[in-house]
Amino acid sequence: MVPKHAEDGYGSLHRAGQLESYFAPVAVREAINQGLDEEMGRDERVFLMGEEVAQYQGAYKVTKGLYQKYGEKRVIDTPITEMGFTGLATGAAYKDLRPVVEFMTFNFSLQAIDQILNSAAKQLYMSAGDCPVPVVFRGPNGAASGVGAQHSQCFAAWYSSVPALKVVAPWSSEDAKGLIKSAIRDPNPVVFLENELLYGVPFPMTDEAQGEDFVIPIGKAKVEQEGTDVSIVTFSKMVGTSLEAAEMLAAQGISAEVINLRTLRPLDYGTVIKSVQKTNRLVTVEEGWPQNGIGADISAVVCEEAFDHLDAQIERAN
């Protein structure tokens, strides 16, 4: 059963007028699993590690079947010690392996923050580019269902402020598969922010997207719906919410353009500015806090680069 609300993949694509070109439905967790499987098959240096990723097949079943297919040397269960296994993965990446680290929730990544920032992210610049660190840090980010405040934070702005980290936040199944494959192939650290509430949501995927050669380049936003009156810029689960809002605005005669950022660092400011130059209005939408958020950064850049194109103040919805 597909839920009829903001995270309804079918409904969002239908509202954006894209459904006609899509085919088989695939849940987000299955799309990530496809991407992991294909990259592990493509490159024997790729391996997975984290709490319960192997025999239990992942807390959210994203790694289902991979332990059985690739064995214990490439799908590794770890103790509950994020600092330890994140450091191990970073060291492996120093030696040209390609680890994918799963955090059961990105809140737990704070236990490993020193390894992510000081050992993984800074190594590129500290080595003058001589030591790439091809490691992916992935897991659920943002608000979750039935958990405490300690498990419901959005870390998009936190990690997007760090030089040399790339930060990705997919919405649809195509986003998830294409971007996880690009993240694994990237020569330097990628923070891959999934959303727990999207894991079980099915999105239509084209035959091309289900092929082994399908990748989505990091650093490029996607215009999910074109419009002429206002630009709505968003990412992750809020893309569905924004498309729903655009439908409500259309009923009032307002044409909204919805931009799915996909990548938060490096952020595709060019696509945002081009849209604002057309619509002359901007709304940013995100789950995280407003101060020092993704929307705050976008607002600053638009004011610097496209202020004369604005017909109204920028609005941030958090």
Image (cartoon, grey):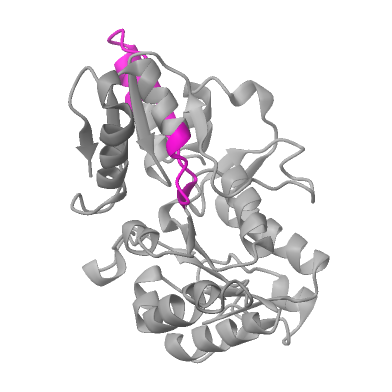
Q: Nearer the viewer, residue 10 or 86?
A: 86
- Up-down: is 83 above or below 178? below
Query: Which stretch is magenta?
Result: 245-270
In the image: residue 296, left or right of residue 33? left
Q: Is residue 14 magenta?
A: no
Whole-percent x, y for residue 50 in the image: 54, 80
Whole-percent x, y for residue 253 in the image: 31, 7
Residue 267 seen by the camera: yes
- Residue at 47% in and 32% down: 271
- Up-down: is 126 above or below 40? below
Q: Quadrant of residue 64?
A: bottom right
Q: How many marks?
A: 0
Q: Nearer the viewer, residue 267 or 76?
A: 267
- Residue at 47% in and 41% down: 268
Residue 143 seen by the camera: no
In the image: residue 170, left or right of residue 71? left
- Up-down: is 18 above or below 113? above
Q: Residue furthest top?
A: 253
- Residue at 69% in and 84% down: 95
Q: Is residue 256 magenta?
A: yes
Whole-percent x, y for residue 65 in the image: 71, 70
Whole-percent x, y for residue 108 in the image: 37, 77
Q: Residue furthest front?
A: 128
In the image: residue 82, left or right of residue 153? right
- Up-down: is 77 above or below 289? below
Q: Quarter holding the C terminus?
A: top left
